């Protein structure tokens, strides 16, 4: 399959990428391209220009400081999955990165690309929201709770480039995903984290956008056990319904994945 | 059209390509390296796996211009001096192919897998093959081939 024509531009820095975006309102950033290029081949996307930021060293790093792990936006899933720092401090995040797509996809796909794209079934948004991470851009810092605004929608403005995501290190965390058997995308994925300031639980794959479950968070704050949330039903209204599963099925899956995630973390 | 240059199987190459030319088409049509196959063309089947700077990627999901300046290895680049790569040998000895269409991608994935994880058990191999589909469903012998290859290569290294 062939995409619509576009102009390819390789940025040498974040500043240059920003300048290139300014001159082209229909331009898109290209990082790993593992979602964007597929969408372009299906002719669902037709950017006028692709500004390639995948090779930028200033966006590729993993650092631990002040109780958080800061990961550069162009860091690949493979690098996160195999990072000694992430594996030691937030093993649930390394695990999440290790089950995105397949090995070849993980060699290309990036954290920033996944978060900016906000696919309803992507894995990373669950960790970003579940850990209460901070998304840093070339212009500002955005709290996870204010970042994901809807299906494929985020708080990012035009010419805004994600440069880093900073994940606070939790006391305990776990990610459980029920993958679609063919595509490996999440039918329902639950990221649960217990931190000093409370419990957070985020769900991906089940709805049009990643979301938290306050009722489960409150119950888990009182007792961090699977039994604590066994009686909490997820409403199916508004959840995804397609050939892979009904909204009711996904609502049920969220409960099952949440209990498994808590059991593993606890 | 611009000229795109990269190193493929150890040799510097340059050819004209549109910005939208995918790496797999660049390899097959511009360089006539038709060992890299197009299966699903949607990043699912893995028939198009090649190595870019030593890492397995799906060449149907990368533009040629993105890898300008990079080192690319295709299935044609594995055998050295007329001698098959140990993974190729293992696929032959274990009947690791039936129709053979998925084989280039399976072998390129296997070489990358063994590089990252020299100690492989069958379950790990099956997980690692998540991005490669064999339409003959001949997975059993593919897994055996990779297991055998990993053993041979660790033996050679020690």
Image: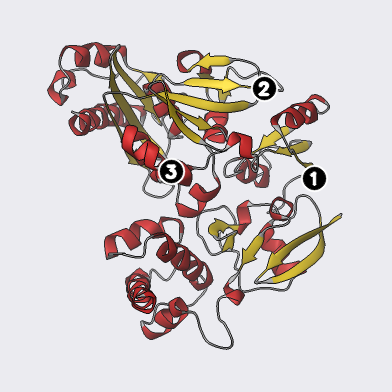
Q: Residue furthest left?
A: A227
Is disc 2 in contact with disc 3, using a CB cutoff of under 8 Å? no
Which disc is residue A5 wearing? 1
How far apart, in angstroms, are the residues tagged by discs 2 and 1? 24 Å
Q: Do the residues labelled 2 and 1 touch (CB within 8 Å)?
A: no
Specify whether disc 3 shares its chain with disc 1. Answer: yes
Q: Disc 1 is attached to a residue of which chain?
A: A
Q: How far apart are marks 3 and 1 (CA)?
A: 29 Å
Q: Which of marks 2 and 1 is in front?
A: 2
Q: Residues within 10 Å of mark 1 (few under 14, many from 20)?
A: some
In terms of image quadrants, where is residue A93? top left
Q: Are marks 2 and 3 on the same chain?
A: yes
The scheme the figure's colours follow is: secondary structure
Quadrant for residue A10, please give it: top right
Q: Which chain carries label 2?
A: A
The chain carrying label 3 is A
Residue A208 in view here: no
Residue at the (36%, 27%) spot, across then down: A247
Which numbered disc covers residue A100?
3
For the N terminus of chain A, give its image quadrant: bottom right
Choose between A195 and B123: the one closer to the eye: A195
Looking at the picture, how far across and down is residue A233, in whole percent? 23, 19
Image side of residue B4 versus residue B99, left or right: right
Question: In this view of the protein, which residue sits in the foreground, A159 or A58?
Answer: A58
Could you tell which of marks 3 and 1 lies nearer the N-terminus? 1
Q: Evaluate whether label 2 is on the same chain as label 1.
A: yes
- Give the number of the disc on residue A160: 2
């Amino acid at each position: 399959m062939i995409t619509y024509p576009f102009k390819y531009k390789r940025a040498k820095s974040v500043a240059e990428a920003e300048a290139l975006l300014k001159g082209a309102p229909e331009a898109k950033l290209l990082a790993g391209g593992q979602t964007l290029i597929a969408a372009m081949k299906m002719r669902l996307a037709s950017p006028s220009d692709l500004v390639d930021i995948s090779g930028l060293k200033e966006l590729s790093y993993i650092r631990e400081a002040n109780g958080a792990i800061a990961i550069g936006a162009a860091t690949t899933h493979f690098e996160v999955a195999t990072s000694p720092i992430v594996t030691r401090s937030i093993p649930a995040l390394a695990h999440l990165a290790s089950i995105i797509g397949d090995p070849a996809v993980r060699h290309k796909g990036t954290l920033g690309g996944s978060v900016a794209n906000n696919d309803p079934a992507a894995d990373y948004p669950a960790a970003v929201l579940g850990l209460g991470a901070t998304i840093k851009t070339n212009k500002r810092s955005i709290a996870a709770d204010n970042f994901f605004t809807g299906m494929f929608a985020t708080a990012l403005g035009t010419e805004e480039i994600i440069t880093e995501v900073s994940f606070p290190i939790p006391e305990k965390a776990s990610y459980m995903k029920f993958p679609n058997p063919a595509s490996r995308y999440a039918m329902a994925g639950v990221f649960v984290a217990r931190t000093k300031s409370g419990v957070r639980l985020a769900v991906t794959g089940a709805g049009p956008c990643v979301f938290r479950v306050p009722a489960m968070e409150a119950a888990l704050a009182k007792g961090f056990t699977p039994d604590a949330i066994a009686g909490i039903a997820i409403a199916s209204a508004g959840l995804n319904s397609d050939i892979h599963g009904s909204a009711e099925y996904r609502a049920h899956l969220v409960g099952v994945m949440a209990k498994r995630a808590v059991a593993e973390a606890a | 059209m611009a000229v795109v240059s990269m190193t493929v199987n150890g040799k510097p190459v340059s050819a004209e390509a549109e910005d939208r030319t995918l790496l797999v088409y660049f390899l097959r049509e511009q360089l006539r390296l038709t060992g890299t196959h197009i299966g699903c063309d949607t990043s699912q089947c893995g028939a198009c796996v090649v190595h870019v700077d030593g890492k397995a990627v799906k060449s149907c999901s990368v533009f040629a211009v993105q890898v300008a300046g990079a080192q690319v290895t295709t299935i044609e680049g594995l055998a050295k001096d007329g001698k098959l790569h140990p993974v190729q040998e293992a696929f032959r000895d274990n009947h690791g192919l039936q129709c053979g269409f998925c084989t280039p991608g399976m072998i390129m994935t296997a070489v990358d897998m063994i590089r990252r994880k020299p100690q492989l058990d069958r379950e790990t191999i099956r997980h690692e093959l998540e991005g490669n589909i064999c339409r003959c469903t001949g997975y059993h012998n593919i897994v055996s081939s990779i297991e055998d290859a990993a053993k041979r290569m660790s033996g050679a290294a020690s």
